[in-house]
Image (cartoon, coloured by chain):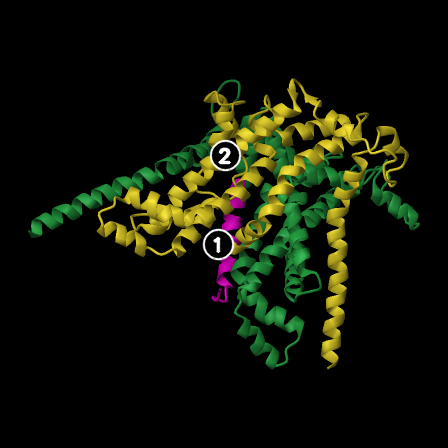
Chain colours: A green, B yellow
Amino acid sequence: MHAVIVKKKKKINVRRGIFIALMLAYPICHFLIFWLFVNINTVVLSFKNPTTGALGFWHYKLFWNELTGEFGGTLRRTIVNSLLMLPFNNFILLPLSVIAAYLLFQKVLGHRVFRVVFFFPTMISIVVLTMVFQFMFNSDFGPVNSLLRAIGAGSVIPPNGWMGTKTVSMGMIMVYCLWAGIGYNVVLITGAISRIPQDIFEAGRIDGIKMGRELWSVVVPLIYPTLSTLFVLGSTVVFTLFLQPKLLTAGGPNGTSQTIALYVVSFVEGTQLERAAATGMVFSVIGVPVILGIKRIMERFNPKCEF
Amino acid sequence: MRYKTTRKIILWITFAVFALYALSLLFPFVWVLLNAFKTNAEFFDNVWRLPKEWKFSNFADAFKLKVGQTTLPDMLVNSLILVVGGTVLSVFFSVCAAYVVAKYKFKGSGFIYTAAIIIMLVPTVGSLSASYKLMVDLKLYNTYIGVLLQYSGGFGFNFILLYGFLRSISWSYAEAGQIDGCSDFRIFISIMLPQAVPALFAVGIVQAIGLWNDYFTPYMFLRKHPTLAVGMQQLVSTMQYGGTLPVLFALMLISLIPVIAVFSAFQKTIIENTVAGGLKG
């Protein structure tokens, strides 16, 4: 009798194993090919000579020479542009989002409508969003310029247009990222705040704490897990941002709004795959530990309470 | 008492700032809408006035626009193939993976979830070159199947959302099924999946909108058959100088119709679903 049960159980376990394996088969194969193999092949490609197929450090040397050489201004500018995205995302965009989300949560007049409107850009294709943004700042017919002229501030319009002037092009990319990106953050953070139990706020209010104090000492610690994830994601943007500059300015003028990822993508588009791989490798080798390190540090500060 | 006044003032300032920002989001689309009904000459003459005559034919003209050999209806079909195929595949494989990881204990089940999150965060900058090479080597470059394969991964954001949802639904019905002798497969299909339908629907809508809007994957791997997003981008670059801009505006509006329709119908589901998980690493 006992042996029969054990045998039956074993049979169930084998069947269960088969079931689990079947359910995971495709996703794991997909991962192995489209992530693991692709990434390993990136390493291999980066050492390959495109004409002879021999392995060597050519593309790394090319990169180093460009970086340190006389004509490496664009590459150095590219790296600075990308690095600037970290403080921009984490110390401008994120705090602004938190403040806006907190205020939205205070049931400002029309908060329901605002929530939907703020979320609206998340639903729109980046192609359309960058297009309307460009139209607004267009030199021939853009409403922004006519508005500025109407209020007598026409002199602030950059000489070659907003997207075409060297000194402002990267700034415009950031303005776009703020304009198109803050809404999603605000809606997301408001969601996190609304999961905080109401009585915690009430306890604070009985003690008579003011809004600034409530935001900093109650809300921020309680939504910390969401904030730390946004912080880490905001840091990866250093290595991943490329569609916005590609569509808004094509990295121009003269590479002044180019970013690391756009630089790599442009090599792929020119089918210089090996060079793209090597350039990407340099930044991955620096980027991956930095991002994982930031994640670690953020977790260390976690006050360990969440809802 | 004095604090109450300060609070009120802060909230009014907030309202003003929010209203301005909301206006900045909506105004460009109203502007595009009004100018989509003008002739080119009228548009350049005065962008601010309402159209003298509402030129609905701009929308008909938009349907005649072409990128290479591909007409607008062709682009719509290309987009639809990728949206429908990509959504079905990615939601299906995500729910398969999320289900066993959330509901069964086996070697590596905890590891898979952690790995999925870390992989999403890790920036693999140069891997586009190897993906491109893989597509070319497998002769999948410029094919629908190639793009659909790229979309069909089971461990992305959908996995994490569905994992969170599946964990929260009760296992007791499944246990009852087990006692009745249902196989694991049967429990998944007839007991657990029906409970997950609302979540699958929500994830599917967000995924479909994302794929409809996706520009880069089809741009990189399906140049021969441009989708609406890719075709539109090419048309802007050519039409910005010397094209009929109001027709381009009409095209943009056409591309927005499905998204706005879906968003208005399921606005609550979409926002709740995006916000629900709260993005915790």
Q: Is residue A55 above or below residue A212?
A: above
Side of A204 relative to B41 (left or right): left
Amino acid found under the numbered disc labelled 1: Gly
Residue under pointer 1: B281
Q: Nearer the viewer, residue B79 or A279?
A: B79
Label 1: how many Cα within 10 Å (few below 14, some 14–19, many 20+): some
Mark on residue B86? 2
Circle 2 sits in a helix, a strand or a loop, which is it?
A: helix
Q: Which residues are magenta?
A: A284-307
Q: Residue at point 42% right, 37% down?
A: A31
Q: Is residue A236 left or right of residue A247?
A: left
Count the marks: how many? Answer: 2
Residue drawn at the location 61% of the way across and 28% of the way down: B76
Q: Chain of mark 2?
A: B
* CB contact under 8 Å: marks 1 and 2: no
Q: Secondary structure at mark 1?
A: loop
Return the residue nearer the eye: B157 or B198: B198
Residue A305: say if magenta. yes
Distance between mark 1 and mark 2 Cα atoms: 26 Å
